[in-house]
Amino acid sequence: MVEPSWKPGMFTFRELLTDDEPGARRFYGALFGWTWRGEDAGRDGVYWLAARGDQHVCGLMQRPPGVPGAVAWRSYVLVDDVDACAERSQAAGGKVLYPAQDIPGIGRFAVIADPWGAVLQPFRATGGESRPPGPAPGTFCWETLVAPDPAAAVAFYARVIGFGTGSTPSGEGTVFTAGQPVADLQPSRPGARGTWLTYVQVEGAEAARDHAVTLGAKVLVPRIDVPQVGTVAMIADPSGAALGLFQPG
């Protein structure tokens, strides 16, 4: 039996920059059962790491003063060379929002935006990568790119990240691949910017959606049934960060 392993193009980690760090920890702890451990981040304050049981899930921090952009979840994607990835992004019409820098003892990352404004964080670990975790409720499981020009987005991410493409199980949509499907691609509404969205697996999408509302969230998409895949709902947390809820079919 072949053990699962990380490959360039796979999403490795998610991180929330929020304007209400204590409130976000309460919200997500109540919604998903996450527990939090704080680490000193120097002048940026405390960086919080979430776990569910013994599995690390994500990071969270208060948005430092003066940092532009909306409150949002951001996804880290594994690449062979972070610096080269940032250079390719700029050459292909994207932007480098934060140049490549080291996270001591963890790895190297940058923050890039594609030509339509969708933000992504290329990453390479220091040393080897651990084995990818299996799917479980309360953990991240998928990404969606919403883009004004899907065909151009396919070309951009093939060049910058190295994504391949394939079809959704129904054959009607497009997915990005990295040895396996890792994200889907959706057209945005006219005039809207591009964005990356991330999803947490739940036992019941509607139940998790309704629970989130009692905790102060807003419903962005009440329910979508994805043929041969499962059920999706989309919420915005009390600070406005969008998040998908995915119930496998």
Image (spheres, helix red, strand yellow):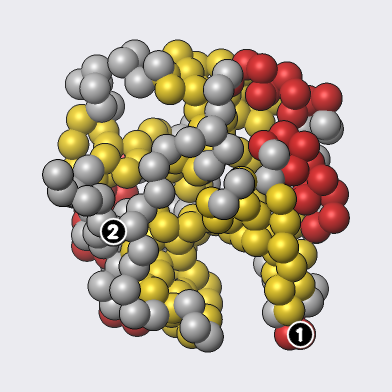
Secondary structure type for disc 2: loop
Q: Where is residue 115 in the image (x, y as percent from the top left)?
A: 41, 59
Looking at this rendering, what residue extends furthest in the left direction?
A: 1
* Marking on residue 232: none
139 or 98: nearer the viewer: 139
Q: How crowded is mark 2: few (under 14 residues within 10 Å), some or many (20 or more)?
A: some
Assign the N terminus to one quadrant of the image.
top left
Dot 1 crowding, Cα within 10 Å, few <14, some 14–19, many 20+:
few
Residue 238 in view of the camera? yes
Q: Which of marks 2 and 1 is nearer the N terminus?
A: 2
Point out the frontmost of discs 2 and 1: 2
Using the rendered view, name the quadrant where residue 156 is placed: bottom left
Q: Which residue is drawn at 58% across and 38% down?
A: 138
At horizontal 36% and vertical 53% (from top left) the residue drawn is 132
Going by the image, does 169 lie left or right of 95? left
Residue 52 left/right relative to 126: right
Q: Residue at x 85, y 55 (%)?
A: 22
**Regarding mark 1 in the picture, which secondary structure is present there?**
helix
Q: Is 66 situated left or right of 10 in this image?
A: right
Residue at 22% x, 51% y is 3
To which quarter of the image does residue 83 belong? bottom left
Which residue position is annotated with label 1? 43
Quickly name the residue at label 2.
Answer: 6
27, above or below 249, in the image: below
